[in-house]
Amino acid sequence: VFYNDIEKHSFTNLIINHISILSLTLVFWISISVFILKTIYSEQETYLETLDNGIAWRVFTGIFFYFAIIMVYYLLIYGYNLREHIMQESRLREKVNEAELQTLKSQINPHFLFNSLNSISSLTITNPEKAHEMIIKLSGFLRYSLAHDPNNLIPLKQEIENMEAYIAVEKIRFGEKLIFE
């Protein structure tokens, strides 16, 4: 039964395999049990007669047990395949979410960078010290963004420092218009 993969074999082939295995199992089981019982009870004629008359019931019981074991086995296989399918679906969902996040990041970062560079360009004429400060803060923020692996956990302190660098760049860009608490 272990080697009879439902997905790889045709239904007819599966039935033929099960009937063959059932027949061999029944012949083996009944032969061994009758041999052992006849050896143990060789002197009791009544029991031997009952044993010979009960072969049909032994066959029926053997068929019942075989199908019960097969059903349990197929249920276990189904449960294992279902669990594997759910895990695979979960991994796929995780990858889709990660891809969406990366897509959003790739859209946001260039927009932020271009706006910051335009602001620096304006500040070089009006306020060179603020332009210099903004370049330093922007480079720190970008260095962190590029070095940070989104799959690894980082300390909260480091994440807060990065957010503060981002806010500092935006504060220089927007000046008094940006209020942050």
Image (cartoon, helix red, strand yellow):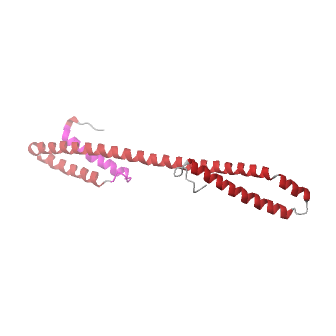
Furthest residue toward left: 125
Rendered location of residue 9, percent (x, y): 54, 51
Q: Is residue 60 left or right of residue 93?
A: right
Residue 154 is one of the magenta-drawn residues: yes
Q: Which residues are magenta?
A: 149-175
Q: In x, y percent, where is residue 26?
A: 72, 56
At 75% from the left edge and 49% from the top edge, which residue is drawn? 60
User: What residue do we see at 28% from left, 51% from top?
Assistant: 145
On the image, the x and y values in percent for residue 53 come to 84, 52
Q: Nearer the viewer, residue 96 or 71?
A: 71
Q: Residue 112 sits in which quadrant?
A: top left
| Viewer-proximal residue among 8 and 143 | 8
Identified at 65% across, 56% down, the residue is: 21
Q: Quadrant of the C terminus?
A: top left
Give whichever of 9, 12 is nearer the camera: 12
Task: Report the residue that reaches farthest toward the top.
Answer: 177
Residue 100 colored in magenta in the image: no
Residue 64, relative to residue 40: is it above or below?
A: above
Specify the quadrant of the image occupied by residue 127: top left
